[in-house]
Amino acid sequence: MENILSNKLFTTRRGTITLGIVAAALAAIVLLVYLNQYRNSVNSGGQAVSVLVAKSLIQKGTPGAVVGSTGLYQVGNIPRNEVKSGAFVDPKTLTGKVATADIYPGQQLTAADFVGANAQALTQRLSRDQRAVVIPLDSPAAVGGQITPGDRVDVWVAFNAQGAGGVSRPIVRLVMQNMYVLTAPPGGGNITIRATPTEAGEFIYASQNARIWLVLRPAVGSTTSKPPVISANDLLGLTPLRVGG
């Protein structure tokens, strides 16, 4: 009986139409499943991912900490299927690394662009507009050798200045405040200060033509003030000396 019904189904016109409809329905289902999977795949690949992208040229040798703290990068929303392997998503992860080659604007920052750096190297603690300058000091001028790396200091300079009457008189003057100490040997000696290029030049000039004294600032809560000029008049309670007049 089953064979008779089967043969009848294939030989009658209605049976042929029924089989065609079933086959078309199955094909439609398969097509819908495929399209749905394809759409999910496309949507997954096109989903935006936030990664670090160079905002301006990052030169070879630039410390990662500088890149992450000076605006050399920006966060870019990149399609997932275009994100490079090892792309950085957090600027903090750049600390302790250094760029191995020039990185151009718009380029993703990846692990392949950076290598581990010597954390003790001074270049790892300098941004593009900062310089390290060494000041030769004896123990008293370096607070008796009690200055340590990471301290903040004020810089006083002692020299002869021309007073209001054209007479040269010795003075001391506060020329810089809140300067950062990079290195400082115990007992005084060559102390390295982080400075701008102009400040570095002033340090060099003062070390050649005057005497420099460093004054240690508090670790927290210190304030800046109007740079004073101190002369013998101040010690004697006389009218303060007007320099350059």
Image (tube, helix red, strand yellow):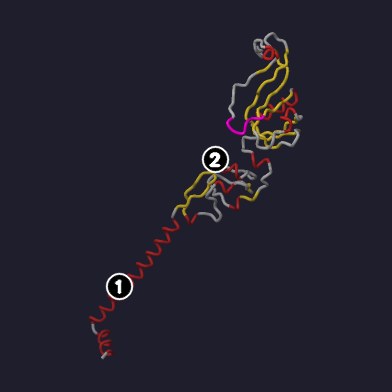
**Which residue is at a point 27% across and 88% down the rendered structure image?**
7
Q: Is residue 6 above or below residue 118?
A: below
Please tell me the numbered disc located at residue 35: none
Magenta residues? 216-221
Is 220 magenta? The answer is: yes
Q: Residues within 10 Å of mark 2 (few under 14, many from 20)?
A: few
Quadrant assignment, res 175: top right
Q: CA distance from mark 1 to mark 2?
A: 59 Å
x and y, in percent, of residue 147 in the image: 70, 34
Q: Considering only order in the chain, which callout, 2 or 1, is on the residue closer to the N terminus?
A: 1
x and y, in percent, of residue 103 in the image: 59, 46
**Which residue is at a point 66% across and 45% down the rendered structure image?**
119
Query: Dot 2: what SS?
Result: loop
Query: Dot 1: what SS?
Result: helix
Q: Is residue 208 left or right of residue 197?
A: right
Q: Residues within 10 Å of mark 1 (few under 14, many from 20)?
A: few
Q: Is residue 14 left or right of residue 215?
A: left
Q: In the image shown, does 150 or 128 lie closer to the viewer?
A: 150
Q: Is residue 179 left or right of residue 78?
A: right
x and y, in percent, of residue 69 in the image: 56, 41
Q: Which residue is mark 2?
A: 71
Please tell me the numbered disc located at residue 25: 1
Q: Quadrant of the N terminus?
A: bottom left
**Which residue is at a point 26% across and 85% down the rendered structure image?**
11
Quadrant assignment, res 195: top right
Q: Quadrant of the C terminus?
A: top right
* Secondary structure character of the magenta stretch overall: loop
